[in-house]
């Protein structure tokens, strides 16, 4: 079985925890593994590393590579497909399926979202084995048995049984249902409907045939285009459900009896986290993260600093240092409205956290004012920033940990903890960590414009423009 992992979503419903450059699939808010890493580990149950294809946003390339490197898994870089723009799930899945056919011929393909939480157990493995048996003649989706009526998920009505040796291994899909209101959701649950998990399995040739038949504009964009840029310029934004699954007569559903959540809202996150005796789900990050609760019950609290709650119930409190969200439980689906408002204002806090990750390490904005910004740079061993210069700002670097190799103009320096250097505006410069330990540098920027786009790169190890 070949596996396609979809890792391009922006996760706008979990702002401010997730941002455009750090969506939920790469955040470690449950344990020391990101949801993306967990998805890769699930893919390895049925596929070798060279049989796994990842479709993601170009901005996430280095997040994907870093997460894979941390797992110690080598997936060929040609298998990491970087979308020029977001076009929903159908174009992404078709592109990956065409690549699989090109490399392996007709194959059974599993499609996994990278931002869901799924318990892997015997039932999970058995469901995929059943789906593999059905994939030659069916486009298989996986149905989760509902634990309660839920208005945030789509539903699947199972139809005729599909049996093997007297054992039910799936059902033909009778109907797909959009996200319902609460009363309709109750009827669906009572009638034996399944939640639509967003996972699929099919033979590559059958899937391509059904795309040709039911989404010809998507197929033609790929078939007639000379490259992926042109294809994505032509292709409509469309989901696999709307484009194919709701139209095909070959859809089947395999029940998946395991714990599952798409973690699509903070209410969903609260549901899966452990609670204290007062029903509070608390996650703290960093050395300063701590929670004190006085007569506070049934709250979700995620914070990076000391947070005290007194006499509050059923609240969602998300503090990321540069932004604070307070919402009533049950209302968290509306967080996307906050994201939209910030996007319209051009606020960069929809794009990046105070801590931004780069292929060489990361930086954290410690403080900023009208004409200054202070950052902490963390450079991984053996990595270096691009050779660059800025038109509008000067920079002052102070080493606090490790050894820095610095180029400023035509000078090359080695700086140790406590030592510093100054880079005037308009002067080429570069920072490198030649050592074996992480390099930490405090950077003070001064200038009339301090945006991240004031950068001219002359040389870059990571191929950035």
Image (cartoon, rainbow, N blue to C red):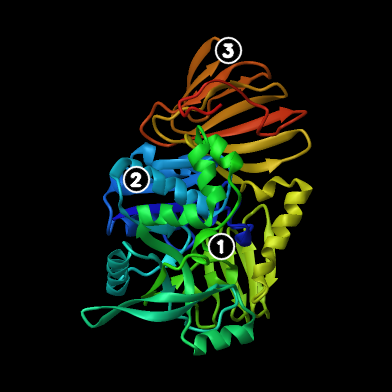
Secondary structure state at the residue bearing disc 3: loop
Element at label 2: helix
Relative vertical location of residue 226 with respect to residue 303 in this rendering, above or below: above
Q: Which mark is residue 242?
A: 1
Q: Position of residue 57 (x, y in %)?
A: 53, 44
Q: Residue at x 69, y 36 (%)?
A: 373
Residue 447: x and y, percent? 74, 27
Q: Residue at horizontal 68%, vertical 56%?
A: 323
Residue lying farthest left?
Answer: 165
Graded by Cα atoms within 10 Å as few (under 14), some (14 to 19) or many (20 or more), the crowding at tag 3 reads some
Residue at position x 50%, y 33% from top?
A: 227
- The numbered mark, 3 or 1, whose residue comes first in the sequence reads 1
Q: Is residue 417 visible?
A: yes
- SS at circle 1: helix
Q: CA distance from mark 3 to mark 1?
A: 56 Å
Q: Is residue 318 left or right of residue 71?
A: right
Could you tell me which quadrant the C terminus lies in? top right
Q: Is residue 357 visible?
A: no
The foreground one among 122 and 282 is: 122
| Dot placed on the residue nearer the N-terminal end, 2 or 3 | 2
Nearer the observer: mark 2 or 3; the answer is 2
Which of these two is toward me, 215 or 422? Answer: 215
Residue pointed to by mark 2 = 101
Mark 2 to mark 3 CA distance (whole Å): 50 Å
Left/right placement of residue 426 relative to residue 10 reads right
Q: Is residue 461 above or below residue 73?
A: above
56 relative to 169 in the view: left or right: right
The residue beneath circle 3 is 409
Image coordinates for residue 460, horizontal then vertical, percent: 50, 24
């Amino acid at each position: 079985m070949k596996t396609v992992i979809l890792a391009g979503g922006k996760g706008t419903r979990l702002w401010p925890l997730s941002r455009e450059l750090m969506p939920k699939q790469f955040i470690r808010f449950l344990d020391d593994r990101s949801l993306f890493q967990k998805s890769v580990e699930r893919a390895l149950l049925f596929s070798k590393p060279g049989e796994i294809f990842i479709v993601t946003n170009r901005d996430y390339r280095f997040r994907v590579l870093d997460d894979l490197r941390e797992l110690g898994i080598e997936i060929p870089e040609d298998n990491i497909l970087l979308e020029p723009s977001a076009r929903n799930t159908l174009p992404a899945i078709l592109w990956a399926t065409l690549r699989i056919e090109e490399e392996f011929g007709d194959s059974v393909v599993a499609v996994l979202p990278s931002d869901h939480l799924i318990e892997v157990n015997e039932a999970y493995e058995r469901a995929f084995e059943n789906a593999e048996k059905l994939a030659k003649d069916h486009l298989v989706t996986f149905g989760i048995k509902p634990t309660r009526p839920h208005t945030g998920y789509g539903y699947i009505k199972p139809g005729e049984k599909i049996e093997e040796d007297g054992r039910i291994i799936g059902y033909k899909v009778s109907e797909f249902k959009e996200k319902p209101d609460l009363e309709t959701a109750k009827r669906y649950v009572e009638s034996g409907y399944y939640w639509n998990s967003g996972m699929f399995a099919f033979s590559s040739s059958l899937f391509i045939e059904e795309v040709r038949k039911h989404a010809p504009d998507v197929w033609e964009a790929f078939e007639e285009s000379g490259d992926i840029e042109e294809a994505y310029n032509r292709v409509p934004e469309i989901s696999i459900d709307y484009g194919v699954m709701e139209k095909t007569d070959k859809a089947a559903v395999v029940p998946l009896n395991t714990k599952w959540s798409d973690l699509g809202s903070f209410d969903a996150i609260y549901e899966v986290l452990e609670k204290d005796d007062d029903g509070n789900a608390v996650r703290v990050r960093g050395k300063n993260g701590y929670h004190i609760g006085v007569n506070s019950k049934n709250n979700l609290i995620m914070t990076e600093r000391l947070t005290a709650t007194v006499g509050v119930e059923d609240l969602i409190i998300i503090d990321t240092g540069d932004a604070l969200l307070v919402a009533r439980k049950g209302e968290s689906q509306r967080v996307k409205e906050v994201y939209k408002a910030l996007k319209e204002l051009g606020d960069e806090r929809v794009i990046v956290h105070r801590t931004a990750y780069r292929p060489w390490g990361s930086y954290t904005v410690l403080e900023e004012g009208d004409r200054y910004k202070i950052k902490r740079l963390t450079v991984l061993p053996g990595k270096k920033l691009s050779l660059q210069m800025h038109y509008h700002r000067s920079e002052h670097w102070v080493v606090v940990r490790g050894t820095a190799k610095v180029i400023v103009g035509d000078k090359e320096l080695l700086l140790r903890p406590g030592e510093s250097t100054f880079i005037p505006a308009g002067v080429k410069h570069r920072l490198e960590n030649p050592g074996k330990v992480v390099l930490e540098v405090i950077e003070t920027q001064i200038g009339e414009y301090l945006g991240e786009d004031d950068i001219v790169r002359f040389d870059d190890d990571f191929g950035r423009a």
